[in-house]
Structures are given as structure tokens and as C-alpha cells.
Image (cartoon, rainbow, N blue to C red):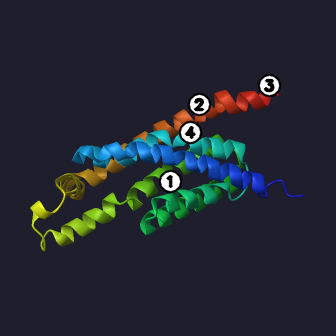
């Protein structure tokens, strides 16, 4: 029997852990209060979702786990660019783990940072900015929601690069936190058993 083949138990585990991120997504709803906090939403997600990503990587050391996780995360957002970016990041994580071994913390961390970068690129902020720039000529600014308009202006001028750097830093910190949690609570328990 192939040890690297996903079983029903593994798929359920990945799905349940993926759904934990719904709580993290719901935390992000308060971030739409100001233009700056709208832009910092991907930074918050990058900081908090690392634990779930690492738990999946250590608990389910099988081919396809991150692809399933990434697909679920994209579908939760229900936005095609987001789904595409998550699936691409899932394929990259799968490739890294295939090459370096399932459960390899360094590969999980690199996969996580790549996922958060691609997720921030595919999020509604960047496509909205493109739409905002096209519609500003046709609509009066007062007709648009002011916070989202301001966020769109910030990201289309200087904010995109700053946001991407913040997401990378936050994802690295999130990966570190996820790695430490897994090392202390999951890998230690396995060693003691």
C-alpha cells in the first residue's frame, strides 16, 4: 500500500483545518473600517494562517494535501483570480515537498510565503484597483465608497510595493510562528509517543 496516497481521513483533516481559516477571514471583516486597514488585510492573514498551513504539512504528509487546502481556500473566497493564485501556490508547495520530502519544515515555510504572496496578488484589492482606475473616469468619486476608493488610490500609486513587502515579512513571521507551534506541540508529542 502506498504511504503517500491520501486517504479519506487525510482529506477530512485537511478540509477541517482549512475551514479554521474561515475564523481568520471573519477577523478580517473589521479591517474594512479605514483605507489603511483594508490594505493591511492580507498582512493580517499572512501572519495568522501559518499555523494552519504548518499543521497540515506535518499532520498530513501526503501528496495532494496542499493542493486540496489551496483549492478550498480559493473557493472560500469565491473569486476566480484568488482561486487561480491559490491553486498555483498549492502546486508550487506540492512540488517543493515532492522534491524535499513531505513534512520538511523549510519547504513548508517557503510554500507558505509563496502562497501568501500569490494570494495577496490575487485578492480583490489588486483587481479592484484596476477596475477603480477604469471607472474613475466614468463615475464621480462621491458615488464610490470612500474607504475603498482611498485604498484603491493608495495601492495604485505606492501601496502595491509596500503591501507586497509587508505581506512577505508577515508571511515569514507567520511561517516562523507556524513552525514553532508545530515543533513544540506536534513534533514533540510524536517524539514522546
Taking the spot 61% from the left edge, 46% from the top edge, the residue there is: 17
The tag on residue 19 is none
Taking the spot 58% from the left edge, 45% from the top edge, the residue there is: 53
Earlier-in-chain disc, 4 versus 1: 4
Comparing labels 2 and 4, the label whose residue is closer to the camera? 4
Left or right of 135? Residue 69 is: right
The tag on residue 192 is 3
User: Which residue is nearer to you in this view: 82 or 26?
Assistant: 26
Quickly name the residue at label 1: 115
Location of the N terminus by quadrant is: bottom right
Up-down relation of residue 87 to residue 50 (above or below): below
User: What is the number of callouts on the image?
Assistant: 4
Image quarter of residue 34:
top left
Quickly name the residue at label 2: 180
Callout 4 secondary element: helix
Callout 2 secondary element: helix
Q: Position of residue 13 (x, y in %)?
A: 69, 49
> How much space separates mark 1 and mark 2, taking CA atoms?
19 Å
Amino acid at each position: 500500500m502506498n504511504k503517500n496516497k491520501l486517504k479519506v481521513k487525510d482529506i477530512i483533516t485537511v478540509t477541517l483545518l482549512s475551514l479554521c481559516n474561515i475564523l481568520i477571514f471573519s477577523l478580517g471583516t473589521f479591517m474594512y473600517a479605514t483605507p489603511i486597514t483594508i490594505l493591511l488585510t492580507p498582512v493580517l492573514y499572512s501572519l495568522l494562517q501559518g499555523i494552519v498551513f504548518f499543521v497540515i504539512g506535518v499532520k498530513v504528509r501526503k501528496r495532494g494535501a496542499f493542493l486540496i487546502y489551496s483549492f478550498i481556500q480559493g473557493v472560500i473566497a469565491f473569486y476566480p483570480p484568488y482561486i487561480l493564485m491559490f491553486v498555483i501556490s498549492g502546486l508550487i508547495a506540492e512540488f517543493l515537498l515532492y522534491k524535499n520530502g513531505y513534512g520538511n519544515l523549510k519547504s513548508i515555510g517557503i510554500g507558505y510565503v509563496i502562497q501568501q504572496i500569490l494570494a495577496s496578488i490575487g485578492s480583490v484589492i489588486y483587481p479592484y484597483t484596476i477596475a477603480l482606475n477604469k471607472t474613475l473616469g466614468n463615475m464621480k468619486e462621491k458615488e464610490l465608497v470612500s474607504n475603498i476608493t482611498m485604498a484603491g488610490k493608495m495601492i495604485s500609486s505606492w501601496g502595491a510595493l509596500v503591501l507586497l513587502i509587508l505581506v512577505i515579512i508577515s508571511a515569514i513571521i507567520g511561517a516562523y510562528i507556524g513552525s514553532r507551534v508545530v515543533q513544540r506541540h506536534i513534533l514533540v508529542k510524536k517524539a514522546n509517543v
